[in-house]
Image (spheres, rainbow, N blue to C red):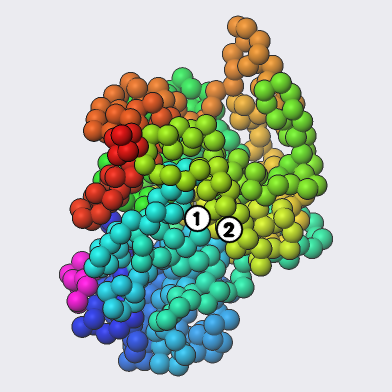
Amino acid sequence: MHRELFGVFGDREQFDRVRSTDAFDVVCSGPRLTVGLRDDDLGAPGWSAQYSDDKCCCVVWGELYVPESNSDDPVNSAEWLVDQYERRGHGVLRDLNGSYLVVLDHEEVAEAFVATDPVRSRECFYTDDPGTRVFGTDAAAVGQTVPDPTPDRTGVLEYLHLGVILGEKTALEGLHRLPIDSRLELSGYTPLDRFVYQPEPFDYVDELATRLERALRRRSRLPGKKGVLLSAGYDSRIILSQVDQIDHAYTVGSPDAQEVRGAKRLAAQYGAAHTAFPPDERYLRPDDTKIRYSQGIKESLHIHHAGYTDDIGVDTMYHGLLCDTFFRGHFTARETVDVLDKRIPVGGLESDPNPIDTLLEKFGYSQAASLELADRTAFDESPESFVRAAVGDAFDACQSRAGDVQNTLTCCGIANQPSIPFHAQLSDHFITSFLATDRELIDWHLRTPPAHRTTATFLEACEQVDDSILRHRPPDRPHDVALLNEIEGFVRRKTPFLPSFEPPWPNREHLFETHDFDQRLLDDLESAHPLPARHKLRITDLRGWFDPWAETDPTLQRWLQPIQSINP
């Protein structure tokens, strides 16, 4: 990886036992830990920073803004953090804003620690297996310090059936990740209370509009030539409308696709150049670098742009990831009506949702595909009972942060968000802004009742910021009323000669067949060829992920072999 944070709870000698200091731009030690940082943009305003003196070592990794920071006199966020910690202690973590990890070791700190942002938008992996606690942002680098690596059967099964490993597990036994909103210490971790739902009445639209403007103003200060990954939908267009220095917009899709045509109109509206990347084999191809960004816990499929990174010519990249989750209630359960073969949402919240059913649907679980996967591998668990128990446990783990089912659903979705590799890959190549993780916007999310975290609220706020933002509507949402969009989509699907709305992403099955990925990726696993493309890509991801641990391959291979070849 181009950027990495890696450390040990120990001195420089203990660091050198597990990692060479030559791999890092900066290595610093405090009284109880040593941490290395590699980042070409270290010290850029709003980005990674480091500070150390004879009393402390502090590293900020990723995107972080502090209250006194401005473009005319940028503040070293690591130095600011040390100064404020000396005055206020752990309370200073509430003022940090962005998508980050912070490492602080100070002689006045009771315990050295690593802290996530409130929503764990950047993972911290750790293991105690080498004999000292090792931590870092690259699961492969941390995992390679495990002396006897063994695949985690539960983690592997969750990955295959759901596309995400839930909770704090990984694909390796002994390799863990820091929970959402917490800090890692020498002998454990401590949950924090920055991400706790406390809904209350206020002007949801006006407050969201105001906070969006402030959040985008902060992020407009990021340096260099700017770009945005642009869809024809709602979430990325608010960025394009407010960050007026954006030079270039990028969309993955065929030039004649509805999504691309819509994105191109948006780019023209706001004066940005536009490039469409055709969905060739680069869109799906899971090469070694792409798989590494999945961290072995989430499928690389979500890194739609990975194959085109070398063709993106900007320094800072913006995206709208998770805006639908934080502002538009993606994980809330909504009332629906059954119309022939489709459930159509009718607007209100489901009064008594089944949380497991809701989360399985939101995670994209396919019972039919999982049954077929079980039939074709040596796993003996019933997929339905397995995934229901796994998702149930993940839901239960989030209840302490939420006061009702709807908020717990959203909290669970955020804590186990499958699409985070999208952000991880971008931020390894560019200075990357993550709008949804702005501290003020997270506060809005936590204080706003689920009934008001809707697309309607978000669009009203966006129109308050820019009254022309809906000049070009998304191609599959031509109406203001969501129900009318669903009805038109249904009619188009059922009416001969009337074109249907196109999906926003390229057709995986078509690309898998066109580029002969069955033979290129799974030529030795013919039993997997009838599976859906998404599940075949998960298998490929896992096999690629375990490649550095050659001795573990027989275990994984045995699980993936056809069951009839093991039990004739």
Relative side of 229 to 26, left or right:
right
As rendered, which of 99 and 242 lies closer to the eye? 99
What's under tag 1, amino acid-wise?
Leu
As rendered, which of 231 and 36 lies closer to the eye? 36
Residue 268: x and y, percent? Answer: 51, 32
Q: Mark 1 or mark 2, which has the lower sequence index?
A: 1
Mark 1 vs 2: CB contact within 8 A: yes
Reply above or below: 501 against 275: above
Residue hosting label 1: 166
Residue hosting label 2: 393
Residue 440 falls in which quadrant of the image? bottom right
Report the magenta residues as a range.
Answer: 16-24
**What is the residue that sits farthest to the front in this orientation?**
568
Tally the numbered discs.
2
Residue 202: x and y, percent? Answer: 80, 60
Residue 313 shows in this picture: no
What's under tag 2, amino acid-wise?
Asp
Prevalent SS, magenta region: helix
Q: Residue at x 31, y 34 (%)?
A: 568
Q: Residue at x 70, y 47 (%)?
A: 354
Relative side of 211 to 128, left or right:
right
Question: Which secondary structure lies at badge 2?
Answer: helix
Residue 91 shows in this picture: yes
Residue 400 falls in which quadrant of the image? bottom right
Residue 94 falls in which quadrant of the image? bottom right
Find out whether residue 250 is within the magenta segment: no
Find out whether residue 23 is within the magenta segment: yes
Residue 370: x and y, percent? Answer: 48, 37
Reply above or below: 241 against 258: below
